[in-house]
Amino acid sequence: EAGVAQSPRYKIIEKRQSVAFWCNPISGHATLYWYQQILGQGPKLLIQFQNNGVVDDSQLPKDRFSAERLKGVDSTLKIQPAKLEDSAVYLCASSPRGRGDYGYTFGSGTRLTVV
Amino acid sequence: AQTVTQSQPEMSVQEAETVTLSCTYDTSESDYYLFWYKQPPSRQMILVIRQEAYKQQNATENRFSVNFQKAAKSFSLKISDSQLGDAAMYFCAYSRNQFYFGTGTSLTVIP
């Protein structure tokens, strides 16, 4: 079974620039999550999709962050414009169902550095 | 909101010895799930062990076991016969409808 694929692996941008991250979940997994992990902290949920619909985006800074999951498969997370405090690892995860009873499968993340 | 607390930012253990990582959580729910994840430098979060709150029996996975104390809201991870490959960040997580992670414990394994 292929894992959760994420790209790029690393990204360095200047503040006020825009950036996009891509995630392809495990085939058949209906639920997809984007997490932000700031250095020294645990991952924090940004947005949860069930198929191509948003289940929870309460912690997504909507003035600069956006995400979509067209066709209920892969997903893109965008930041525009980026701020210094957006420097973090962005993790994508997927699960076969929306409940939290089974562990998620995580990708290897994208490390974003904003300078 | 649920909170997960890991009070040990760093731990170290001699190879082949046993180490216990601590985790406490806060919730008013009775039905939930608890997890330990390992995050090596590759950044990928790897599921180590899972505990269902309605089960009193502590989960075990090979050298990994937990001590689940529901009344105390405590969920510690014991790693037996520590190996060099166990060195990583370990995150405790609570889940009901979404995951809440602690701040992590960095484990060093000394040869």
Image (cartoon, rainbow, N blue to C red):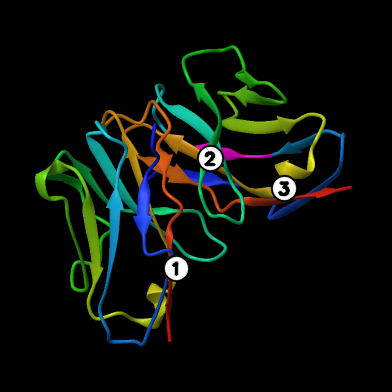
Q: Which residue carries the number 2 mark?
A: B46
* Residue B69: image location, x then y, percent: 61, 24
Residue B23 on the magenta span: yes
Host chain of mark 1:
A
The amino acid marked with disc number 3 is Ala
User: How many residues crowd around disc 1 within 10 Å: few (fewer than 14), some, or many (20 or more)?
Assistant: many
User: How many residues crowd around disc 3 within 10 Å: few (fewer than 14), some, or many (20 or more)?
Assistant: many
Q: Which residue carries the number 1 mark?
A: A88
Q: Which residue carries the number 3 mark?
A: B87
Find numbered disc 3 in the image and state the secondary structure of the residue it sits on: loop
Residue situated in front as seen by the camera: B34 or B39: B39
CA separation in Å, label 1 and label 2: 19 Å
Residue situated in front as seen by the camera: A94 or A85: A94
| Picture residue at 39% right of the left edge, 22% below the top | B31
In the rendered structure, the answer to whether residue A91 lies left or right of residue A61 reads right
Find numbered disc 1 in the image and state the secondary structure of the residue it sits on: strand
Host chain of mark 3:
B
* Residue A88: image location, x then y, percent: 44, 68
CA separation in Å, label 1 and label 3: 22 Å
User: How many residues crowd around disc 2 within 10 Å: few (fewer than 14), some, or many (20 or more)?
Assistant: some
The amino acid marked with disc number 1 is Ala
Determine if marks 1 and 3 fall on one subunit.
no
Q: Which residues are magenta?
A: B22-26
The amino acid marked with disc number 2 is Ile
* Residue A4: image location, x then y, percent: 37, 44
* Residue B81: image location, x then y, percent: 82, 30
> In terms of image quadrants, where is residue A10?
bottom left
Looking at the image, is A94 positioned above or below residue B7? above
Which callout, 2 or 3, points at the residue further toward the start of the chain? 2
Looking at the image, is A7 positioned above or below residue B30? below
Main secondary structure found in the magenta portion: strand
In the rendered structure, the answer to whether residue A30 lies left or right of residue A94 reads left
